[in-house]
Amino acid sequence: MTEELNMIYDELKSSNASTVSHYEIELSKIRAGKASPAMLQTVVVDYYGSPTPLQQVANVNTMDARTISVQPWEKSMLEEIMKGIINANLGFAPQSNGESLLISVPPLTEERRRDLVKQAKVEMENAKVGFRNNRKDAIDMLKLLKDDGLSEDMMKDGESEIQSITNTSSKRVEDVFDVKEKDIMTI
């Protein structure tokens, strides 16, 4: 029975880790006013008929705290990259100089900063809902083991271990949120 319990714990940890990873990706989309290549992480470009991530067709760098530079590996891709950035709905208007794209990241107003913090908080709550769903699945698996002869004490220990894993994951997401909130609110 111990092996089955460890398998449940490992599966819960794995599910929670992927939820945390997804949360971090969602937070990277929320810009804090400073230019970063990660802001264009979700951009997909039509590369000769197949959708391709921007990072696979161009170099993406920051020139300064307010400007992102996109240097395509093929000049002919400049127009497609521009379309991809606009279609990604990130609120950027890329400017072409014939060889590369320059994207100006406007400074954030106080009101916009608060909205971004709210958006990050919503994403944190979504991650916590994911943890609760993962916890429920793990407890359901534990109940199946109880039907197969798991003792009452082991059942209680298993539930407390599952709760401990969930609390640890929740704390991790809150810590990531705190860092992002500080980043957003810092001028």
Image: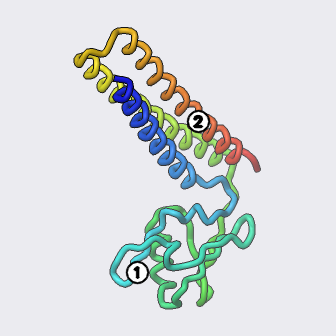
Q: Is residue 165 above or below residue 109?
A: above
The amino acid on which the numbered mark 2 sits, given as a three-letter code, is Arg
Disc 2 + disc 1, Cβ < 8 Å = no
Residue depicted at 67% across the width and 47% down the height: 184
Q: Name the residue under label 1.
A: 47
Q: Distance between the residues labelled 2 and 1?
A: 38 Å
Residue 21, x across and y down, in percent: 50, 47
Residue 173, x across and y down, in percent: 56, 37
* In this picture, residue 1 sits left or right of residue 162: left
Q: In this view, does 186 lie above or below 155?
A: below
Quadrant in the picture for residue 44:
bottom left
Q: Mark 2 points at which residue?
A: 172
* In this picture, residue 95 sits left or right of residue 5: right
Q: Which element type, helix, strand or loop, lies under badge 1?
A: strand
* In this picture, residue 124 sits left or right of residue 34: left
Residue 93, x across and y down, in percent: 56, 71
Residue depicted at 54% across the width and 55% down the height: 29
Residue depicted at 52% across the width and 52% down the height: 25
The amino acid on which the numbered mark 1 sits, given as a three-letter code, is Tyr
- The one of 167 and 153 positioned closer to us in this rendering: 153
Q: Which element type, helix, strand or loop, lies under badge 2?
A: helix
